[in-house]
Amino acid sequence: MLNDKDASANIAVKDLEMARKFYGETLGLKQIDSIGDEVAVFGSGSSKLVVYRSQYAGTNQATAVTWSVGENIEAIVHALKTKDIKFEHYDLPNVRLEGYLHVAGKMKVAWFKDPDGNILNILNE
């Protein structure tokens, strides 16, 4: 029923203008649509990231969005660091921390948060 339909990630934020700057300027996503001062839609590859104003912003304690960035993950981490992104460190079983990257076998992951505390990550796969 839904297997051939596109899906979008949805992120709740308190301050939509701050979120526009973060997702647009810091992460480099292009805003492709909006609904007044309540919703901003960003393009990310062939996907959409819908950022909307909500009183529940930042309450999700799990990863909200993952970007698969391939083998350029180290360069992307470096570029994000130059934009003052603070990376999270998690103690995970069978995972070692190498700088800002969590590594398990060939998998490399880096987690960070948006201004509202939503957890985002990049993955080398």
Image (spheres, helix red, strand yellow):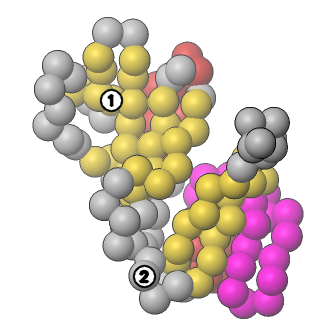
Q: Label 1, secondary structure: give it.
A: strand
Residue 48 in percent (x, y) is at 74, 54
Give the residue type at disc 1. Answer: Leu
Q: Is residue 52 above or below residue 100?
A: below
Q: Splitting the image into 4 quarters, where does residue 39 fall?
A: bottom right
Local packing at callout 2 (Cα closer than 10 Å; few below 14, some 14-19, many 20+) is few
The label on residue 52 is none
For this view, does 14 lie left or right of residue 112? Answer: right
Question: Dot 1 surroundings within 10 Å: few (below 14), some, or many (20 or more)?
Answer: many
Q: Which residues are magenta?
A: 25-42
Q: Earlier in the sequence, mark 2 or mark 1?
A: 2
Secondary structure of the residue carrying numbered label 2: loop
Residue occupied by mark 2: 56
Amino acid type at circle 2 is Tyr
> In this rendering, is residue 73 above or below 41?
above
Residue at 59% over, 29% down: 69
